[in-house]
Amino acid sequence: MEKTELTAQQEMMEIPAEKMAEIKDHIVKSQSVLELVADSLEEKLQPEGSDITTELNALTTIYDQLEHAYQDAEDVEAFLKQTEAVDKKNA
């Protein structure tokens, strides 16, 4: 492969790696908001004895899905970084 081809491949890999980091940041922020909402619901509704189990379970499910997405994003990011390192080594 020519050096220009490797450079082009490297540039294409850097953009997804940056996006993966951005996606992970959004996931972490979303998880934090979900935790705040769940804690607030529990705190506000506890004195009245309202049953918010369904809502809290839904929030937990969303949180779990975000956690799974975060792990997938980490896996993809690691792959992209590994590929980038190999491309740099071969350049």
Image: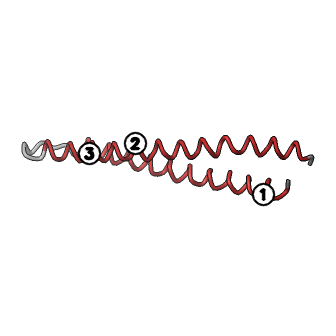
Apparent side of residue 91 relative to residue 75 in the rendered image (left or right): right
* Total numbered circles: 3
Apparent side of residue 44 relative to residue 72 in the rendered image (left or right): left
The spot of residue 49 in percent (x, y) is: 9, 45
Q: Characterize the local packing of mark 2: few (<14), some (14-19) or many (20 or more) Cα atoms within 10 angstroms.
A: some
Amino acid type of disc 2?
A: Ser
The spot of residue 37 in percent (x, y) is: 27, 42
Q: Nearer the viewer, residue 29 or 42?
A: 29
- In this rendering, the answer to whether 10 lies above or below 75 is above
The spot of residue 77 in percent (x, y) is: 62, 51
The spot of residue 39 in percent (x, y) is: 23, 47
Secondary structure beneath dot 1 equals: helix
Image quadrant assignment for residue 86: bottom right
Give the alpha-carbon distance from disc 2 to disc 3, as whole Å. 12 Å
Of mark 1 and mark 2, the one earlier in the sequence is: 2
The residue lying at 13 percent from left, 42 percent from top is 45
Q: Are marks 1 and 2 in contact (CB under 8 Å)?
A: no
Q: Are marks 1 and 3 in contact (CB under 8 Å)?
A: no
The residue lying at 56 percent from left, 46 percent from top is 21
Image quadrant assignment for residue 54: top left
Q: Which mark is residue 38?
A: 3
Of mark 1 and mark 3, the one earlier in the sequence is: 3
Of mark 2 and mark 3, the one earlier in the sequence is: 2
Task: Tell me the residue that label 2 is attached to.
Answer: 30
- In this rendering, the answer to whether 4 lies above or below 84 is above
Amino acid type of disc 3?
A: Ala
Q: Are marks 2 and 3 in contact (CB under 8 Å)?
A: no
Q: Which mark is residue 86?
A: 1
